[in-house]
Amino acid sequence: MSEEGKISIGLISCSGEACPGGTISRLATQKVLRSIRPGYNFVTICLPLFMAGGEEERHFARHYPTITIDGCEKCCALKATEVLSGPVSGKVVVTDLIAGEKLGEGTLATRELTAEQKAMVDQVAAAILEQVDKINREG
Amino acid sequence: MAAKYVILPCNGLDKEAGCLARELALKMAAATGSEIICPVLYQTAPSRYAPLLREGSLVVIDGCATRCASRIAANNDLKIYRKITMAEEAKKRDYNPGPDWRVGAGAAAFVEDVWRSWQPVLREQEAGRAPGENAGLFAGPLEYAIHRHDKFIFRVPLEGFYFNENDCWVQVQGNRGRVGISDYLQQNLSDITFVTPPDPGTEVEQFGEMGTIESAKAVYELVSPVTGRVVAINEAILEAPELINENPYEKGWIAELELTNFEADREFLLDGRRYLEVLKEKVADFNAGK
């Protein structure tokens, strides 16, 4: 629990340079972070720092419920978290939700999203919030 | 501009600076036909990027002062051509990264301005010699002698390095010499914050000035151990002077000279073993408060 009795939940997003799903996962994570959910305190964990040796980030993911958000089936965020901090409490993989051909190829600039891609962001954000609710239900 | 770079951005999510680093990486990649390395994928599958790193010059873009991208590059012994830190660029421009991670119009203009200011710097590569040229000429020391005193450990390379009594060294290969400062001096100076190396083309005399080093304690005038013309400087220390603290004999070298009179210069220099004895005396004198 964090300040004001809120449940602290960590969000670890794919970094998003190797696949367009990465950008979708970044934006969806940001959207969840900005969402107002009474009772929750969302904490981002910077994945590059986490992997480069950030002890505070690793400690948080070890001791608080954490959800990984991955852009593709490589699941860098999930694998790194499991190796460096232990099992995650929830996971979202963009390519499990959206077919690869719809996502396209190459790096996606955040400021050039189509309406369809914005809808993908909403879809992934909703999937993250489902995981949040699951954590709450399961205590 | 059509130079090809390999860009390693921090692209962290939890600070706007990280998002700005990513935006700059995207802009640079689009403008120069360069490739971006995903810092996360690089750590899980480094071989994927090995061909790119062999071909292109590495530009590292850090977001905040944690400098994760630089850390990743250092951990993997990557040779950095240029390093950009968005937090520092923001400071120069009085731009305050806001709490919102969305890259709005203000942030976009800021990134555009950073990119505009870096273009001429990157163009230098096209005009100058390829980065890394001569990198293999000066291999690091094979062996260090160690002198311990209290909690301090001083290292001196025994072979291939010559020192003056001002604690500056030269490593000689043919008619080229690479110069820097000793481990003893860097520890005395403590955290080095700024380096002003001599300009390329400068003619330097033995025992003449070859730039300055600034630390939290003092500004130190470097005394050249050799005579020659400066043909290159270690640009990495301009962005990361702490490299001198990390290892003054390898990544922390300062300048490279074309030597003009080394046989005569050597008469006034100490080899590693003799310098080690001088160093021990200096440490003892310092301890005795002389």
Image: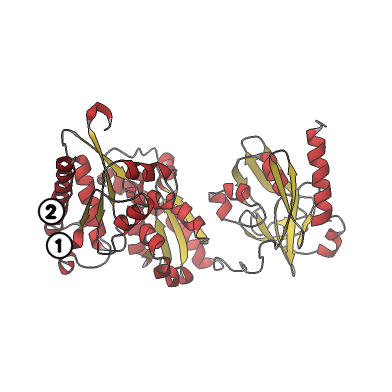
* Residue drawn at the location 20% of the way across and 59% of the way down: A94
Q: Nearer the viewer, residue B15 or B109?
A: B15
* Residue drawn at the location 82% of the way across and 36% of the way down: B285
Residue A24 as seen in the image, left or right of residue B50: left
Same chain, marks 1 and 2?
Answer: yes
* Residue drawn at the location 59% of the way across and 50% of the way down: B243
Could you tell me if the residues under marks 1 and 2 are in contact, i.e. CB atoms within 8 Å? yes
Specify the farthest residue to the front: A138
Residue A123 visible? The answer is yes
Give the class, few, some or many, for how many residues have Cα within 10 Å of label 2's Cα (few <14, many ≥20). Answer: some
| SS for callout 1 | loop
* CA gap, disc 1 and disc 2: 9 Å
* Residue occupied by mark 1: A98
Determine whether B189 is above or below A72 in the image.
Answer: above
Residue B271 visible? The answer is no
| SS for callout 2 | helix
Which image quarter holds the C terminus of chain A? top left
* Residue drawn at the location 42% of the way across and 64% of the way down: B6
The spot of residue A35 in percent (x, y) is 17, 40
Question: Identity of the amino acid at label 1?
Answer: Ile
* Residue occupied by mark 2: A123
Residue B267 as seen in the image, left or right of residue A64: right
The spot of residue B251 in percent (x, y) is 61, 56
Determine whether B97 is above or below B204 in the image.
Answer: above
Q: Quadrant of residue A92?
A: bottom left
Say which label, 1 or 2, has the lower sequence index.
Answer: 1
The spot of residue A1 in percent (x, y) is 26, 33
